[in-house]
Amino acid sequence: MVRHLDRPQQNDRVEALRISDWGLRIKRKNLFALQSAIRNPRSAIALLLLSFFLMAGCQKGVGTIYSIAIHPTRPEVIYLSSEKGLYKTVDGGTLWNRIEGGLGTFPVLSIAISPALPSILYVGTFSDGVYRSTDAGRSWLLINAGMRDYVSVVNAVVIDQKNPHILYAGTTMGSYKSVDNGVMWERISTGLNSVFVVCMAVDPQNPSLVYAGTSGGVYKSSNGGQRWTPSNNGIIEREREHAMALGVNAFAFDPATPGRLFTATAQGLYESRDGGERWIDRKIPDPFVLSVAVRPGTQPSLYAGTNRGLYASRDEKGGWEKLSEQEVRAIALDPNRPEVIYIGTGSGLFKTEDGGKGWTRFESLQ
């Protein structure tokens, strides 16, 4: 069984904790995830959280990369989030800079760039909630108003593409929504049986349709997150004690086909052509899928990152070609050059300029 994490008690007096050589200092309210993991060692979610704390200092360089975001009109500007923080390049990757400006040294789990004004960025962090920058990352403001005081792990921040003032956040304590650029958040978890939200997505054509990927499968809302219903028709179900095997890791929409989206799960890659009403297994060879991306066009391409490498499918017949061997947690596609792909792995960032035939690791990314 996966047990929901308990709310910390008022008599928890620990003010800060230094773990290993990482040197991460955590405020009392942010010790909740670690304390819960220690109290509930059989909880898969708690163990996952605990592993972040214990292992984050072991990686060299940037460590595991969780997300990659490319500037919508200047593809040479790239942001990536990792367990060592947030990084940025303005020259396509020749030189990378670690972004601080008040952001701190916490692991950054997700990045969102405003489509209307790309200088506005949002990030979800592992230990301090949501931050916003209005100057392309030079300075940051913590924006957690309305979130419960023990919400610190924000796995996903997504933006309504038609109204960029509206944001959604997926956390270990459910889902949240803001209608004012993050100034105030409202918890929107009615019907969301799993409080552990790993990823979220907003339909680019119909933003009232919102999707949440959880440790218990896919949930869908047709009214902007006010009420959620399970949306797992066609996705394999398993016993509840194996709930992590049901985990949903990522979503991707096909921008050229309304209602078509993909979800990456620990059981495989699934496609829906009716807005999530039914899912079809795409039969990927390595079924533990961590990330997914779609390149539209006359010959659309589907990319799936698994724990054993990157796969590509370039036809409707569903055939797969393996492009890399690394565990792929994040995928980003250059909007102007179809052969350019970036992948974030547990050992850094890689780039191909020939559609996956050869890969270059960004050694300057430290």
Image: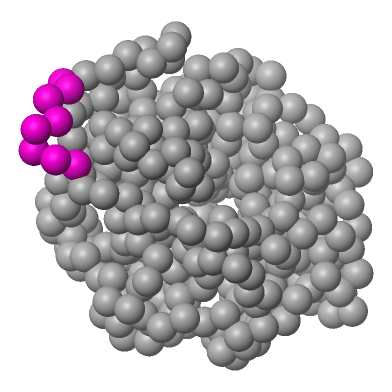
The image shows residue 330, relative to residue 363, as above or below, that is: below
Q: What residue range appears in magenta?
A: 8-15
Residue that lies at the very extreme toward the left in this rendered image: 10
Determine whether, in the image, residue 360 is placed left or right of residue 157. right
Q: Position of residue 102 (x, y in %)?
A: 24, 26
At 51% across and 73% down in the image, what residue appears?
218
Front residue of 90/46: it is 46
- Give the residue displayed 33% in from the left and 78% down from the top: 191
Residue 264 versus residue 32 in the image, above or below: below
Dividing the picture into quadrants, the one containing residue 9 is top left
Locate the C terminus and report the quarter of the image it occupies.
top right
Q: From this view, report whether residue 22 is shown above or below residue 239.
A: above
Helix, strand or loop: magenta stretch? loop
Q: Is residue 9 magenta?
A: yes
Compared across the picture, whether 222 is left or right of 295 comes to left
Q: Where in the figure is residue 40, as x and y percent of width and height?
A: 39, 41
Horizontal placement of 244 versus 220: left or right? right
Residue pictured at 86% horizontal, 60% vertical: 285
Residue at the spot 50% in from the left edge and 17% down from the top edge: 57
Do we see residue 266 in this rendering? yes
Residue 123 placement (x, y as % from top left): 36, 44
Q: Is there any visible trace of residue 79 in the rendered image?
A: no
